[in-house]
């Protein structure tokens, strides 16, 4: 019995000892669910593997979930937020995923919250950008951060500065340092506090008080001093 003739591509793959790759254009039916390596032009092997695994997870979610739940994820303001919202939604993420990585949903939800805070804060600035805007050196900005005169949050492997803490001239809002000194919530918790409206200050957010009502600083400091008193230790 004559065997089936192997394709040139299959012969070359076997000779090289490699599994055949699928092109970026998905000439084979979406790489059969990305179960074989995908060749992503311009990316390293690690980057290609990351994209492949990410796409596999996204396809699994897209196939399993309802249009209503997917629309909820699509309502996120950023691409990262959309993915985080889909993964963190227990109705979207499969039970198998939750069993394999029980912290995945919590991590994704935290990522979505951070993206929302970044958007509300007007974006994040690097130390170099802040230094240039203020006519200072990056070292001076570092010292101001360490002395609680500026707020930074860890993001993408470096310290970033929420734009909302500066006035139009690039100066820190009056009273910001005193508020930062009064808080012990960690960088992201502090940013959340500054951006969240509170009935104790007439429905304003602390950053609005600093920006528009500097005469209410003492009131704001009393509120800052109560943070964490009733929360988990």
Image: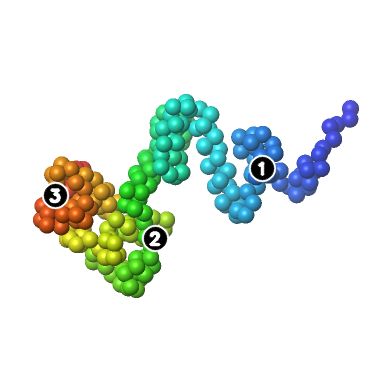
Would residue 60 be found to the left or right of residue 205 on screen? right
Where in the figure is residue 116, as x and y percent of width and height? 35, 45
Residue at image position (51%, 32%) is 62
Tag nearer the camera, 3 or 2:
3
Q: Which mark is residue 158?
A: 2
Where in the figure is residue 30, as x and y percent of width and height? 64, 36
Where in the figure is residue 124, as x and y percent of width and height? 36, 56
Decide: is 202 above or below 124. above
Q: How is the image coloured?
A: rainbow
Quarter holding residue 152: bottom left
* Residue bearing mark 3: 223
* Residue bearing mark 1: 25
Question: Which numbered disc, 2 or 1, marks the residue that appears first in the sequence?
Answer: 1
Would residue 34 be found to the left or right of residue 161 on screen? right
Residue 98 visible from this viewpoint: no
Helix, strand or loop at mark 2: strand
């Amino acid at each position: 019995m004559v065997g089936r003739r192997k394709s040139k591509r299959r012969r070359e793959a076997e000779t090289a000892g490699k599994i055949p790759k699928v092109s970026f254009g998905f000439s084979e039916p979406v790489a059969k669910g990305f179960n074989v390596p995908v060749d992503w032009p311009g990316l390293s092997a690690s980057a290609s593997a990351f994209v492949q695994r990410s796409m596999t997870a996204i396809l699994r979610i897209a196939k399993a979930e309802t249009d209503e739940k997917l629309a909820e994820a699509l309502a996120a303001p950023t691409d990262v937020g959309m993915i985080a919202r889909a993964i963190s939604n227990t109705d979207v993420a499969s039970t198998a995923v939750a069993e394999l990585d029980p912290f995945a949903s919590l991590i994704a939800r935290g990522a979505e919250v951070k993206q929302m805070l970044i958007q509300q804060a007007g974006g994040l600035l690097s130390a170099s950008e802040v230094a240039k805007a203020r006519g200072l050196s990056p070292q001076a900005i570092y010292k101001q951060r360490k002395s609680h005169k500026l707020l930074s949050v860890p993001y993408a492997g470096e310290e970033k500065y929420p734009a909302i803490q500066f006035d139009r001239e690039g100066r820190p809002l009056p009273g910001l340092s005193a508020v930062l000194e009064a808080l012990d919530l960690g960088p992201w918790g502090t940013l959340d506090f500054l951006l969240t409206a509170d009935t104790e200050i007439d429905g304003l957010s602390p950053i609005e008080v600093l920006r528009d009502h500097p005469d209410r600083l003492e009131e704001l400091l009393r509120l800052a001093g109560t943070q964490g008193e009733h929360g988990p230790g």
